[in-house]
Amino acid sequence: MTFLSALVLLVLVMDGLGDIPLFLSALRNVPRERWMHVILREMGFAFAILVVFLFSGRWLLMALQISERSLTIAGGIILFLIALRMIFPSASSPGMAEATDGEPFLVPLAIPYVAGPSAISTVMLIMSREPTRWLEWLGALAIASAITCALLLLSPWVHAALGDRGVRAIERLMGLVLTTIATEMFLKGVRQFVEGIQRV
């Protein structure tokens, strides 16, 4: 995996555009002058959580004795399911937006909207495959977080410019890109599995 492919993958799974309606709903009871502070704080929390899993996830997988090919196949399946949800959102998706009284703290903005299961599993997968390139993966995560943060800071204007339909259309396009990445990851894991059997 290249630095650029890791960056694109992280931007897609963090799904800044898809989070815009959720953030706007969660922040509706917060004064507008506090929005920038809250978004920056929650993105800081999310980044810290993902960094923890970036560096500790490999040891967790080793403790569970999960092989690289198994992780690659499972990662491809998980990303494919995430992509399907982006392309074909269920009718219950809007219900993900949790009503909050006052200012949200950690939940639900940092977890699970940004640092959700998909983002956590992705950073674990990236690091476990090539741990020696940890500086590149950390840089990709930092840039992806900055892009997501910028989208969320601009969320009122982005939503006003694109509308619900525009946001959903772009998210579905991102889902299509993610399906190709997930399929390639799955096929690579299968190839590794077949090659391992042939060597035996």
Image (tube, rainbow, N blue to C red):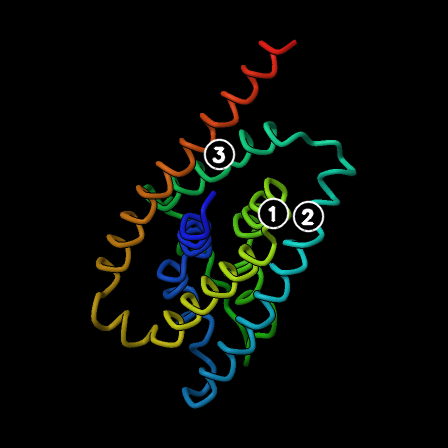
Q: Nearer the viewer, mark 1 or mark 3?
A: 1
Residue behind mark 2:
57
Quick check: 155 above or below 17? below
- Mark 3 — residue? 76
Q: Are marks 2 and 1 in contact (CB under 8 Å)?
A: yes
Q: Secondary structure at mark 2?
A: helix
Give the x, y percent position of residue 22: 42, 64
Q: CA distance from mark 1 to mark 3?
A: 15 Å
Label 2 crowding class (10 Å Cα cut-off): few <14, some 14-19, many 20+?
many
Which residue is painted at 42% across and 77% down in the image? 28
Specify the amino acid type for callout 2: Gly
Is there a contact, CB below 8 Å, between mark 1 and mark 3? no
Residue at 23%, 65% in the rendered image = 163
> Which residue: 52% across, 26% down?
189
Q: CA distance from mark 2 to mark 3?
A: 17 Å
Q: Earlier in the sequence, mark 2 or mark 1?
A: 2
User: Which of the 4 image quarters holds residue 7?
Assistant: bottom left
Q: Amino acid at mark 3?
A: Gly
In the displayed structure, 143 sits above or below 199; it is below
Q: Is residue 44 left or right of residue 28?
A: right
Tell me residue 102's x, y (percent).
54, 81
Q: Is residue 161 above or below residue 198?
A: below
